[in-house]
Image: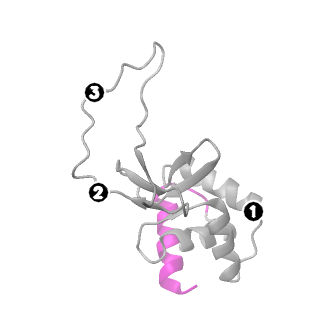
């Protein structure tokens, strides 16, 4: 990893007040070091870390992704209750999920309209709405 990627990762962590451990810095650099938004799974980030020469366990990747989500750095989107994608773009926007390949990409937000949401049950508030548009090749 180069110095620019590491600096971006360090700045990203510092902005959320997270302690910059070696593992957090390495994973942050992979997530935001090039300045691009991305969608990852814990497994794909684990593979990227090992490909870059970082020694982290899959459990560390899961724990770090959870810490990043808790700090507001990432957004977790769960598919079918079993597969989670982590998005570095935390703004409200829809996604495409390609059922045949498992690819997960941003969908254009310009056409999306959510007119009404049902009221939240008593004692709760709506914290967000995830829109995932499932696609199947024809």
Q: Main secondary structure of the magenta part?
A: helix
Counting residues from the N terminus, which is met first, the one under dot 2 or under dot 3?
2
Q: Residue furthest top?
A: 122
- Does 55 appear above or below 133? below
Classify the position of the C terminus by image quarter. Answer: bottom left
Instruction: Please give the residue where the numbered disc 2 appears in the rendered image.
Output: 108
**Quarter assignment of residue 112:** top left
Counting residues from the N terminus, which is met first, the one under dot 2 or under dot 1?
1
- Nearer mark to the viewer, of 3 and 1: 3
Does residue 126 show up magenta in the picture?
Answer: no
Is disc 1 surrounded by few (<14), some (14 to 19) or many (20+) residues within 10 Å?
some
Which residue is drawn at the image coordinates 41% and 37% (left, top)?
Answer: 128
Left/right placement of residue 61 relative to residue 1 reads right
CB contact under 8 Å: marks 3 and 1: no
Which residue is drawn at the image coordinates 50% and 79% (left, top)?
Answer: 5
Which residue is drawn at the image coordinates 54% and 87% (left, top)?
Answer: 2
Give the distance between the C-alpha atoms of the residues marked 2 and 1, in whole angstroms.
32 Å
Q: Residue 17's x, y, as percent?
A: 52, 55
CB contact under 8 Å: marks 2 and 1: no
In magenta, the rendered stretch is 1-19
Instruction: Please give the residue where the numbered disc 3 appears in the rendered image.
Output: 116
Give the distance between the C-alpha atoms of the residues marked 2 and 3, in whole angstroms.
20 Å
Q: Nearer the viewer, residue 126 or 71?
A: 126
Q: Residue 6's x, y, as percent?
A: 54, 78
Circle 1: element type = helix
- Marker disc for residue 58: 1
**Quarter assignment of residue 68:** bottom right
Residue 79 visible here:
yes
């Amino acid at each position: 990893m180069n110095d620019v990627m590491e600096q971006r990762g360090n700045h990203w962590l510092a902005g959320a007040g997270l302690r910059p451990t070696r593992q957090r810095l390495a994973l942050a650099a992979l997530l935001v070091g090039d300045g691009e938004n991305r969608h990852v799974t814990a497994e794909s980030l684990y593979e990227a870390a090992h490909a870059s020469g970082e020694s982290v366990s899959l459990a560390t990747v899961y724990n770090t992704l959870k810490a990043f989500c808790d700090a507001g750095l990432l957004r977790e989107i769960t598919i079918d209750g079993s597969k989670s994608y982590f998005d570095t773009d935390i703004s409200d926007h829809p996604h495409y999920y390609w059922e045949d390949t498992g690819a997960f990409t941003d969908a254009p937000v310009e056409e999306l309209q959510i007119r009404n949401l049902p009221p939240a049950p008593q004692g709760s508030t709506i914290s967000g709405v995830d829109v995932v548009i499932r696609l199947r090749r024809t």
